[in-house]
Image (cartoon, helix red, strand yellow):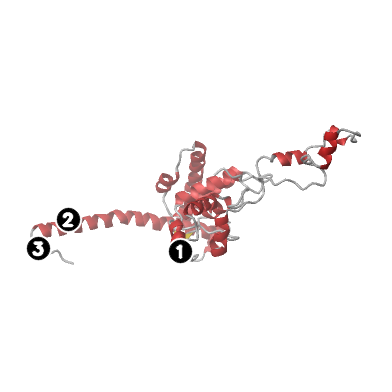
Amino acid sequence: MNDTVNASDSEAPEAPVASAPGEAAAAAPTPAAERRPARRGGRNRRKGAEGGAAPAGAPGEPAAPTGGGRRTHPALEQLAALYPRLFGAQFLPLKRGIFQDLLDAHAGVFERDALKVALGIHTRSTRYLQVVAEGRPRHDLQGRPVEAMAPEHVHHALLEVFRRRKPREGEDPVAKLRRRIAQAFEASGLDRAGYDALVRGRDEQANALLDEALAEVAERDAKAEALLRAFEASGSADVAPFADMYGMDARAVERSLQRARQLRRAAEARAQAPAADAAAELAVEAGSEAVDRGATPSA
């Protein structure tokens, strides 16, 4: 994924990192030798002026095509025509196995290797990574959401999008990325240990940023849980007067209470899971013992 951050789609970067030779020549000032009026005579000079190739950047000549133009793989053009909801102006994350689905749905239409290359270009594009980083679900060929995006895919897409991204003037991209990581963690529904185990990689800078984001969420969650306890202890059924009593914004309080309730439900589910697993194991053991004794285990 070596596209520049402004590489907006599957075709090509909008702003190439380096200019092509033709562009450099067009941008350069005209050499003094070219500014001098041509002297009479000089067969080679006259031939160059009449029949030879014009120098790069000559006035009135169209610019030569460069690598910065938009390029579209032919198979991607076909896909955009067939599936505009997936490959058109707006992208959607693709389900795993979409490659085989396309081959099966369009036998003889797509050459296998060409389709593989086209999908690689598409899924490495910044525009595609942006929708993955937003945590949108994966979609099938009919445009139906069929699978949640894995937290680790969201996280790594976020890192890559921000790596490519050119920050705006006065913007702190690190702080913004840290906030996005925190939001992705909260949306995952996982606890800190589970999320960390999925997304932590080998990049030490990225891991340090992950640690900072998780620490911020932990601090915020602790405040939210304390706020929920205070709200429940107040006996109030309405958030607005409770928030007003503490001089807080009612909408912010409501968000914090929702987050605290979500954390409480997740903790209760984790606490119940071992008990359910233990009960299942006991049932299996009881059934095995009954079979060993020659009895039929109850349904």
Q: Secondary structure at mark 3?
A: loop
Which circle marks residue 295 in the picture? 3
Where residue 116 appears, as percent x and y from the top left, is: 49, 52
Vertical placement of 145 versus 46: above or below?
below
Q: Secondary structure at mark 2?
A: helix
Q: Quadrant of residue 105?
A: bottom left
Q: Quadrant of residue 294?
A: bottom left
- What whole-number distance in Å separates the C-alpha atoms at marks 3 and 1? 52 Å
Vertical placement of 219 versus 294: above or below?
above
Q: Amino acid at mark 2?
A: Glu
Q: Amino acid at mark 3?
A: Ala
Q: Which residue lies under the disc numbered 2?
A: 285
Q: Are marks 2 and 1 in contact (CB under 8 Å)?
A: no
Q: Is residue 223 visible?
A: no
Q: Nearer the viewer, residue 237 or 98?
A: 98
Q: Quadrant of residue 148?
A: bottom left
Q: Is residue 282 visible?
A: yes
Labels 2 and 1: the sequence-earlier one: 1
Where residue 23 appears, as percent x and y from the top left, is: 73, 42
Where residue 6 appears, as percent x and y from the top left, is: 63, 48
- What whole-number distance in Å separates the C-alpha atoms at marks 2 and 3? 14 Å
The residue under the point 47% across, 50% down is: 153
In screen coordinates, is 60 left or right of 111? right
Q: Which residue lies under the disc numbered 1?
A: 105
Q: Residue furthest front?
A: 43
The residue under the point 67% across, 49% down is: 69
